[in-house]
Amino acid sequence: MDKRRIVNLKYRAEIDGLRALAVVPVILFHAGFELFGGGFVGVDVFFVISGYLITTILVEDIENKRFSIAKFYERRARRILPALFFVILVCIPFAWMWMLPTQMKDFSQSLVAVSLFASNILFWRESGYFDAAAEEKPLLHTWSLAVEEQYYVLFPILLIFAWRFGKNRVFWMIVVMATISLLLSEWGWRNTEIANFYLAPTRAWELFSGSIAAFLVQKNGVKKNSFLALFGLAIIVFCIFFYDEEIPFPSLYALVPVFGVVLLILYADRETLAAKILSSKAFVGIGLISYSAYLWHQPLFAFARIRLLDHPPEALMLTLSLTSLVLAYLSWKYIEIPFRNRNKVSRKLVYTSSMIMLFIPFGLGLYGHFANGFENRIASWEYLRSIPVVGDTYCHNEGRRSEAQLRENNFCIIGDGSLEIAIIGDSHAGALFDAANDFLISKNRSALAVSGGYCAPLLNGFSDSRGDCAETIQTAINHAIASENISTIIIAAEWANYTTGYRGNDKPRLWADNLGRAESPSDNIELFKRSFANTFETLSASNKRVIIIEPVPEFHYYAHDWVGRRLLFSQEEPIREAVRSLPSISVSEYDERNQAVFSVFNRHSSPNVSYVNTKSLFCDEDKCYQYNEDGLVLYSDFNHVNYHGAQKIIRAVSSFFNR
């Protein structure tokens, strides 16, 4: 082995310091500190570091003809599994005590996914319109571990297979794969945002960037360049403080922190200022425990949010952030280090214990899934199950449900009788369908029912470029107008979503129509104005009765979860009191949220168009509520009405038929 290769394998303290720069911002970002709005780039920093270190090890072993796939997987098992398994074991009793059955079932599924190194796939499939709050998932952060584990499984095999073609060709093959992956991520954030975030194909380029750096360091060594090293450090820090959730990620924007890490790997010689900063005791100390710190922080935050009901104060989140570092040190010293010691833990014991560490959460997870989250733990669960929730029982998303009639251009039909009505909109329209179905049956009528998540009932091609929303809405409205049978068109939506461009904890959405795309959330209002004007003009000219349902109040808490947790944590509390403890919002908050919407609505009137005032249904003079005077819950989550809430709206809509 030549001297350069010996240098390549030598410990680089600045890499451990770089791990600290990755993990601390991630922790503080997940804790909710706005100053660290771009702290999520720490995950990308980890990916590059992993790609660099793993490729360095693999190339050295292959070139020196000592590579063993079994030994490689053994090293990964020693590094990853013990601390991960211990954190999972600690999570289980808290999940049992504090989680609702629905949450416990989700947690059980994540146990299975972690055991299969597939949690990124699970969270991609789970993420959606009615998914539980991400910040309350204790194992959500394991998605990034799954991406790395998939890389660890596949990359060595790929490298061994390709090595026969020569080292130089392997290098360029990795460059090509990284480029394809980067281009895929740039396409992905525009077309399949959630998959783009979670899945390995759109994250692989970050790991491959580390691999490319490993090849370059092996060839040239670490070249001292103080300016480039410091520049790399500076742009990572810039991203941590100036990126935020509005930035599409991963995408070309992720090139900035990734490039910063690569610059540090290539040019941060130990004599450079950047290396001296990162090699300081504080940075290296945190870097050494960074893996355990990453494992601990999300469960601490998630269980705090679950147990407290209300949003945890910043002081508590800061305390938990520091606690994650303390726990990380303990698990690093007493779990990670001993397991890496081959003199204390043999290879056979590693393989045996690894199988056990994977099988136990896998088995418990399967049991929890099929036991429906151990719902018998909660005496009041029967009541909670009686609270209607938004589900798949209504004609929602492409107008389908198993028991629905399908006719009228293959759209879903609700009710029973003469087809006289069309109900069109996004999921807020879909939330009305079950109550509308029962009402229509009682009146011997039926309705065309068309809705889809984030599908604004607007013409002019208004959409966020996801799926076929614009085409579906256009077809439905045109069909309703052209139909001789349909005399009434009802449209409903979460209208403020299309003016402000965001809802709840979602990332801001940028909308588009046939004439252009919003470049910032503030541009959405102009798009909404012209699309609504076009839609209103078309509908008012149709000579149909048109009913526009105004936005319902939106809250900060899931009604079902709030009531469930109150009853779980205080078994003696009367159900009625638990319901009446649901936090309200002020009328002024409702007005502010919908200010732009009503500004547009107020400019458009027509004799055949009516607006349904929903504020009067859910609010008094000062506040808006998720329950009625009888203590009946009216919402399924924080913004969708359930069956009871929908009944109030349908009754208000029906009053227009008598005019």
Image (cartoon, rainbow, N blue to C red):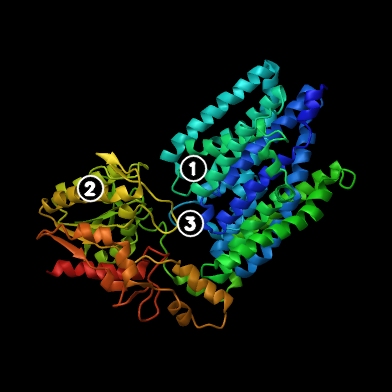
Q: Can you tell which mark lies on residue 249?
A: 1
In depth, the one of 478 and 193 nearer the eye is: 193
Q: Which of 169 and 466 is in front in this view?
A: 169
Give the residue at x 32% y 58%: 494
Tell me the quadrant of the picture where the N terminus can be found. Answer: top right
Which residue in the protein does label 2 denote? 531
Secondary-structure class at tag 2: helix
Q: Position of residue 183 (x, y in %)?
A: 48, 31
* Marked residue nearer the N-terminal end (2 or 1): 1
Closest to the observer, 579 or 251: 251
Disc 3 from disc 1: Cα separation: 20 Å
Q: Where is residue 626 in the image (x, y as percent from the top left)?
A: 38, 72
The residue at 58%/36% (across/down) is: 231
Query: Is residue 417 among the parts visible in the rendering?
Result: no
Position of residue 530 in the picture relative to residue 323 (left or right): left
- Residue holding disc 3: 131
Q: Which of marks 2 and 1 is in front?
A: 1
Three-letter amino acid code of the residue under disc 3 = Asp
| Residue farthest along the right direction in this orientation | 343
Other residues around mark 1 within 10 Å, as few (<14) / some (14–19) / many (≥20) = many
Q: Of marks 3 and 1, which one's residue comes earlier in the chain?
A: 3
Q: In this view, does 400 lie to the left or right of 2?
A: left
